[in-house]
Image: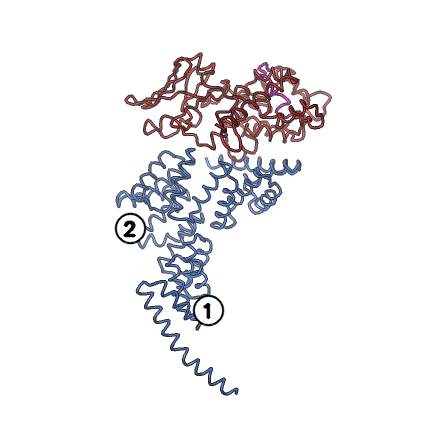
Amino acid sequence: MIRWLLLAQLAALATASAQECGACHRREAEAARSSPMSHALQPARESDLLKNNPGLSFRSGNFSYSVRREGNHNIYSVTDGTNSINAPIEWAFGAGIVGQTYLYRRDGVYYEAPVSFYPELKGLNWTPGHAERLRRNLEEAAGRKIDPAETRRCFGCHSTSAVWSGASVVESLTPGVQCIQCHTGAAQHAAAVRRGDAARAAMPKLAAIETEELANLCGKCHPSWADIAANGPRGVLNIRFQFYRLTNSRCYDSADTRIACIACHDPHGPLAKDNSSYDSKCQQCHLAANANAKICPVSKRDCITCHMPKVDVPELHYQFTDHRIRIFKTGEKYPD
Amino acid sequence: MRSVLVLTLAIFGLLAQPQGESILKNAITLHQSGDLPGAIRLYQEYLKLRPDGLDALSNLGAALAHEGRFAEAIAAYNQALKIQPKNPQALVNLALAYYKTGRISEAREKLESVRPMLPNNQQVAFLLADCDLRLGDYKKAIALLNPWEKEMPNDLGLSYLLGTALIRDQQTERGGQVIDRILRQGDSAEARLLLATAKLNAHDIPGAREDLEKAIELNPRLPEAHAYLGLAMVSGGDFEAAAAAFHAEMQLDPYNFAAVFQLGMIAKRDQHFDEALSLFEQSLALHPADPAVEYQIATVQLATDKVEDARRRLEKLVRESPGFLEAHVSLATVYYRLKRREDGDRERAIVRQLMADEETKKAAGK
């Protein structure tokens, strides 16, 4: 009972903080509601992708997979034609731009479903890393068991307040990335503001911190340059690790905030999809007045269409924007 | 007065020698009858009278080792070697005691020193090859075993050692021939383990796992089978099962480097940093100065905000192993954390160069 109360309080704190932040930081709070990060996790019953696709199926070898909507529930099922394993999906991971992966629970343990939804396919296909897994029987075909450490990491990044005193308290989480996930100390800041304690209310301004420091902050969830340089993957599969790709750009400068993640992306808002909206970011450096930066002889518009080409990753059924900014040459080998 | 004292000492000496010899004789009798605690007590009693008793020291070491009291056995053998530094039996026994306590580098050193004295001794050659294998010197193990292969082509133990060295050295074709030779003698746990090792090298994780499970079914006590199963499970992302496999290996051999090291990696993954550090330190005792272990210790230091400690360790590591890419990566991170931007940029440039070199080598190999 005490544990439940503590969990409920913790959940209230995260939610209240988000609302409380919005009382003063209205623009950011409103924009954040539509940002992909705030939808990084959803209870499966609230997933629009699942609501709009009530009958999904996929077959490979001896096994057939399906996800079907039954009332407010989404039932994941795998069968070998004779027997089957069924379980309600609890969580949908990912905002659904690239794809959405599902977690279900059996005997108190979380499993990652081997099939994910891909908008590009408008259907199911292998979850990354599952195509090559051993499937000798129905149990192995049903999915990958997620151990407590991985559960903590998954929910730690895709939700807010899921991790408490080093233990996973999934029951108390707030789905998606909320203010306090990046703005450490927001709760104390809000309390100090309430008390009128201006001295204690001060918070570090994230927009002002150095590029590498910011990379470390974002790198808590988005794999950093060091993560990928040390552990891979090599080749085209590292296209989705934007900070790694950006850091390997010739124009990357660890001291220059004009090339930091948030120089181009507003973490509080939706992803800008209009190519020209990024031109002004490039022109922060690539101006005629700046002798150190080259000026593009081809165009002054839609810089990213040439210099940040789209790369298709068949396993992920998506075209990713390559954040390794460069003069792209047709037929070039993918630069690692 | 002086003459009385001399006479007393002389009488005492005359009496002590036969008494000492009878103690030694009794000790040997007890040793041969299997009463090892009794034999140990008498050897120790004898050595109080004759601290330079070479046979007693050697026998004491053997009895202590048999009782699993390896630290004391090592001390006895070392004492014997002080008296006769080139005593081959004491050197072999000391090497065995080191081997059984996981001090493989020291075992190898002793075996290398005894080998010129016993060039045709099969036990010495095979044990030395096994030490080379465990320390990752596959080519040395192969060179050592090659002459024996001609003499004993059907020896299963030799084929197993040689096959393992060949497979781990990526000499797939010759390794495959040795595996075939083993398989011709029927399905065996050893053959399955070898097949699994070859499959792991070829990144066929499901195949390796199947062979390892079969190997364990055939012989649950086969050395390294559980550790390799754990490695296959780690590659497949099944960390809980992998930890259980590594623990099973450590039940059989508490000094198995792969099991200790991988348990450290799993503890680090679970953010149990104190436990990880302790396991990495144990790994370092098994493989002294192993760069991979040193690197993991540095990453734990970095994760626990001991940034200066991590910097010192990583700087030493890249000095000693300048091509160690991951160490340069972590060192770059350390420098950025310490606000030493130029040093961080330099390390990052080294990483890029190393990656480019790797790419060039790969392309040249195709």
Q: How packed is label 1: few (under 14 Cα within 10 Å), some, or many (20 or more)?
A: some
Chain A: what color? red
Q: In the figure, is residue A65 to the left or right of B260? A: left
Chain B: what color? blue
- In primary-sequence order, the first of circles 1 and 2 is 1
Please provide percent x and percent y for residue A214. Answer: 62, 28
| Residue at the image point whose x is 32% and y is 68% from the top | B29
Circle on res. B83? 1
Q: How packed is label 2: few (under 14 Cα within 10 Å), some, or many (20 or more)?
A: few
The residue type indicated by label 1 comes to Ile
Please provide percent x and percent y for residue A171. Answer: 48, 25
Which residues are drawn in magenta? A258-275
In the displayed structure, would residue B47 be above or below residue A195?
Answer: below
Residue A259 within the magenta-colored segment of the rendering: yes
Determine which quarter of the picture holds residue B228. top left
| Residue at the image point whose x is 40% and y is 80% from the top | B15
Q: Which residue is mark 2?
A: B154
Q: Residue furthest front?
A: A1
Please provide percent x and percent y for residue B27. Answer: 36, 68
Judging from the image, what secondary structure is the residue with disc 1 in? helix
On what subunit does the disc labeled 1 rest? B
Please provide percent x and percent y for residue A255. Answer: 67, 30
Judging from the image, what secondary structure is the residue with disc 2 in? loop
